[in-house]
Structures are given as structure tokens and as C-alpha cells.
Image (cartoon, grey):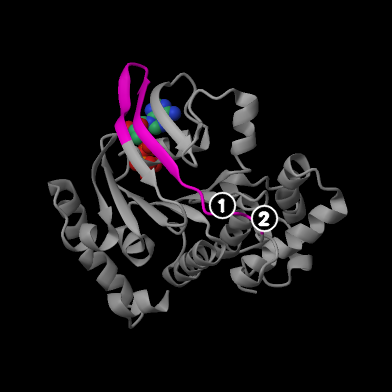
């Protein structure tokens, strides 16, 4: 089933954006984020790039509402142009985390309990947030697994995380992230741990969810190859700051900041080698998506 055919996300209203302004974070006397301005555009795939340690995950986790303990944070994070998330009371924040904004990680098992069935992983959130009974939650879980194209959903619900491949688990993690109708999905290195064919399947799924459901996606990755295949816009981070932002084409083809130029220059060999091993070119890989 394609995302368009799913009944799950009907009546969701328009896509939602998030506006980050002047986001600054200090922890143990160290400045980790420095006046980050970021427009997460509604219904778009918003890329956030930069090498390891540049602050991508800290920015994402703060937007999700899970900054590190003890961090001093200033600035503004506006949900849908009107609701200030920063400084919101924890109880209210909880209704945004997982219900409006969700996240998937590089390692899908990091957000799963190894001893709980896929049904429990998928339905706990819905039962708590959406107040569904077990039967209703199971029905919705089956729909969600169909949406992310996990084969034989009924059977899958009775199994455990270790019985699935990395790619299938990432699909299940995406289904869980969307289980309570989130309108913004932050995908932090969602394909980094997967081999290249499985990677293409997950990227395809994210694009489908974005286009068909109007899901706003923040795609966080150091891999500009993944970025160039998927993102509408790219923001480049370095040392806790955004150094360059623009449409994907401009950033990939006409980068201005020396750091972005270095990132791009380190890209072609890696990507081309990877695609060549599959008998593909960059252009054909994009057509595949
Ligand atoms: N909980 C924490 N306590 C202290 N420092 C932290 C914490 N989390 C991140 N940092 C530091 O903040 C900086 C940015 O880290 P962050 O994880 O956001 O980078 P990143 O760009 O996402 O890289 P990676 O892809 O490796 O996660 C790094 O220097 C990191 O060491």
C-alpha cells in the first residue's frame, strides 16, 4: 500500500513547519550551539548536514524537546508559526513529543526494547496518547506496518526486534514514530547503518511519506550523497553554527562557504564508487527515487 492509499493520515490538515531562531546552548561552560537559525519548511524534506560533532543531533534533540541534562538554552523554537516550544512546561511538551514531532535514529534498536513484541513497541504510544484499547491499537498498528511496507503485518506484530533485518526494523521504527499522527519527522542518519540497496528503499519510503502525507521531514546526515538524493533544502552546520543554507541544487552545485566546498569535495569519490559498484550513476540513482 502506498502512503496515499492509507486511511491513517486523512484529515490531518496542512503540513506543519518549525522555526528555530537564535538557538544557543551552553553546557559545562562550553558553547555547543551558537545562534542557530533554521527554517524547517512545512511539507518539505529539510536537510541538516555537517561532519560528526557539528551539532546536528543536539539541534534535533532540542527541537524534539530532549536536550542534555543541565544545558542552558536560549532562543526560540516555534511550532507551526505560533507555539513556542522552548521553555514550555514538561507536561505540555509531552503532548508535542511523539504526537506532533517524532524522531528516528541511525540504530532503530536504540528506541526499541529487545524483550517487547513489535505490537507492544508500536501500540504503547497510541494507547497512552490516543487512548485506544488493545484491539483498536492493534488494528492501527497493522495499518501502520502496511504503510511502511513491512510484509505480513499481523505476523510481524507477534515477533521481536531481533527477528528482523536492519532495514525492516528501520521501517518499524518509522511506523512507531508516526503512530500518534506526528506531522514532523526528524530522521537522524536513518540509513547510515544500512547497506546501499536497503538504504535506497528507506529513502524511497521517506520521500513517499513526505509527498503523499505532507509529512515534514528533517533529514539529518553527514552523508551529502543521501542529502543530494532527497533533500529539498540543505542547511550546513559546523561547530554549533549554521554556515550555509539554501536549495539542494545550489548547495551541492554552487557551495559558497569553504567548509561546504570541503564537504562536497570529499563526496564524489565515495558516492560514485558506491554507485558504480551497483552499475548506477548519480543521475540514475536520483531517477530511482
Ligand atoms: N550530552 C552531552 N554532553 C556534553 N557534550 C555533548 C553532549 N551531546 C553532544 N555534546 C557535544 O556537542 C557537540 C555536538 O554534538 P552532536 O552530537 O550534536 O554532533 P553531530 O553533528 O550530531 O555529530 P554525530 O553525527 O557524531 O552525532 C559535540 O562536540 C559533542 O561532543
Viewer-proximal residue among 266 and 237: 237
Quadrant of the image where one finds ligand 1: top left
Q: Evaluate whether residue 158 shows in this view.
A: no
**91 left or right of 183?**
right
Residue 159 lies in what quarter of the image? bottom right
User: Nearer the viewer's eye, disc 1 or disc 2?
Assistant: 1
Numbered circles on residues, count: 2
Majority SS type along the magenta span: strand
Is residue 12 rendered magenta in the image? Answer: yes
**Residue visible at 42% across and 69% down in the picture:** 196
The answer to whether 106 is drawn above or below residue 93 in the figure is below
Label 2, on which residue?
A: 161
Contact between marks 1 and 2 (CB within 8 A): the answer is: yes
Label 1, on which residue?
A: 108
Distance from disc 1 to disc 2, alpha carbons, whole Å, reads 9 Å
**Residue visible at 51% across and 49% down in the picture:** 16
Position of residue 178 measured from the top left corner of the image (x, y, whole percent):
62, 53
SS category of the residue bearing label 2: helix
Viewer-proximal residue among 20 and 273: 20
Magenta segment boundaries in residue numbering: 11-36
Amino acid at each position: 500500500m502506498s502512503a496515499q492509499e492509507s486511511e491513517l493520515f486523512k484529515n490531518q490538515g496542512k503540513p506543519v513547519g518549525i522555526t528555530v531562531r537564535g538557538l544557543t546552548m551552553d553546557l559545562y561552560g562550553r558553547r555547543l550551539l551558537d545562534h542557530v537559525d533554521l527554517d524547517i519548511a512545512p511539507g518539505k524534506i529539510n536537510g541538516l548536514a555537517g561532519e560528526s560533532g557539528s551539532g546536528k543531533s543536539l539541534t534535533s534533540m532540542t527541537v524534539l524537546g530532549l536536550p542534555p541534562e543541565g544545558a542552558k538554552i536560549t532562543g526560540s523554537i516555534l511550532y507551526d508559526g505560533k507555539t513556542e516550544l522552548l521553555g514550555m512546561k514538561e507536561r505540555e511538551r509531552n503532548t508535542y513529543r511523539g504526537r506532533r514531532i517524532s524522531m528516528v535514529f541511525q540504530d532503530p534498536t536504540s528506541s526499541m526494547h529487545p524483550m517487547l513484541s513489535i505490537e507492544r513497541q508500536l501500540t504503547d504510544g497510541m494507547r497512552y496518547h490516543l487512548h485506544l484499547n488493545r484491539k483498536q491499537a492493534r488494528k492501527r498498528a497493522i495499518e501502520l506496518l502496511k504503510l511502511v511496507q513491512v510484509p505480513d503485518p499481523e505476523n510481524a506484530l507477534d515477533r521481536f526486534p531481533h527477528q528482523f533485518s536492519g532495514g525492516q526494523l528501520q521501517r518499524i521504527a518509522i511506523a512507531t514514530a508516526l503512530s500518534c499522527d506526528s506531522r514532523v519527522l526528524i530522521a537522524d542518519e536513518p540509513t547510515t547503518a544500512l547497506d546501499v540497496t536497503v538504504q535506497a528503499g528507506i529513502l524511497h519510503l521517506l520521500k513517499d511519506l513526505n509527498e503523499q502525507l505532507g509529512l515534514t521531514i528533517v533529514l539529518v546526515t553527514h552523508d551529502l550523497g543521501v542529502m543530494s538524493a532527497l533533500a529539498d533544502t540543505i542547511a550546513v552546520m559546523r561547530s554549533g553554527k549554521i554556515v550555509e543554507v539554501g536549495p539542494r541544487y545550489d548547495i551541492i552545485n554552487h557551495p559558497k562557504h569553504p567548509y561546504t566546498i570541503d564537504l562536497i569535495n570529499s563526496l564524489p569519490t565515495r558516492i560514485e564508487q558506491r554507485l558504480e559498484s551497483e552499475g548506477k550513476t548519480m543521475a540514475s540513482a536520483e531517477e530511482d527515487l
